[in-house]
Amino acid sequence: MTTEQILNTYANDGVVRIPSFFSSEETKQVRQEIERYAHDIAPTLEASEVTFEADGKTARNLWRMEKYDSFFAQIAQKPEILNLVRELVHGEPVLLGVETFSKPAKIGSGVPPHQDNAYFCQAPADVLTIWIAMDAATDGNGPVHYARGSHKLGMQPHKASGVKGNSIGLAEKFDHSDPFIGILNPGDALIHHCQTIHYSGPNRTDFPRCGFLLVYRGAHTQSDPELKVAYDKARASV
Ligand SMILES: O=C(O)CCC(=O)C(=O)O
């Protein structure tokens, strides 16, 4: 895929799939490093840095991994990644976080429909997520679903969701008529805009569906007071 094709699809759809974003060797290495982190580092961290599934012991999300481990700090600074992100966020990339949405086999929980900028609260909305498949994301194991083009709607109201790891979700119904489903092979990536509505179902299969995420903003974006107020209100709502 050329950079121009990536930029055009991202601009039109608010999400773009990039095959083989990581090679199979890189994917294997990152998967091993995630396992090492979950085993050796996560247990030493404050509760806010890991969200567990309902079993109370399997990680659903590892948050801010770049703060605690140099492997994850470094991988987010790879020049070829930054060069692409620079074009997409219209400015110098600033890392917002390295994280996982691990969706383990059998117990992986769903993610309610949301726009990431309801959490990030940045303006202008030059913020994106690179979601890299560590496992195959199939129809059955809870792939990410997107409402294609929904980044053009602007920010929608959110409310408390009751979901651990995704405290808020869309307050109202949204248009499902043009879905984009993130079916991926290991190493493939999705890049989504921070206003693109997305969600995923639970994983009841025997196959894990781990996503490894790199989140960036352009250096020119700023925290938006109105979005912060909306975030606080959404979190406090029932
Ligand atoms: O991995 C998932 O199922 C959801 C990911 C997500 O919500 C995100 O990338 O913001």
Image: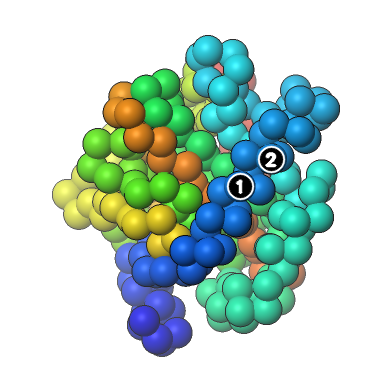
Q: Count the marks: how many? A: 2
Give amino acid for label 1: Gln
Residue at left offset 76%, top offset 51%: 66
Residue under pointer 1: 32
Viewer-nearest residue: 227 or 73: 73
Q: Position of residue 25 (x, y in %)?
A: 53, 64
Direction from residue 17 to residue 154 in the image, left or right? right
Contact check, label 2 and label 1, Cβ < 8 Å: yes
Is 60 above or below relative to 199?
above
Q: Position of residue 205 (x, y in %)?
A: 30, 28
Could one spot residue 223 in this view of the protein?
A: no
Residue at left offset 51%, top offset 37%: 102
Using the numbered discs, state the Cα–Cα distance from disc 2 to disc 1 in whole angstroms: 6 Å
Q: Position of residue 49 (x, y in %)?
A: 73, 32
| Residue 188, quarter of the rendered image | bottom left
Residue under pointer 2: 36
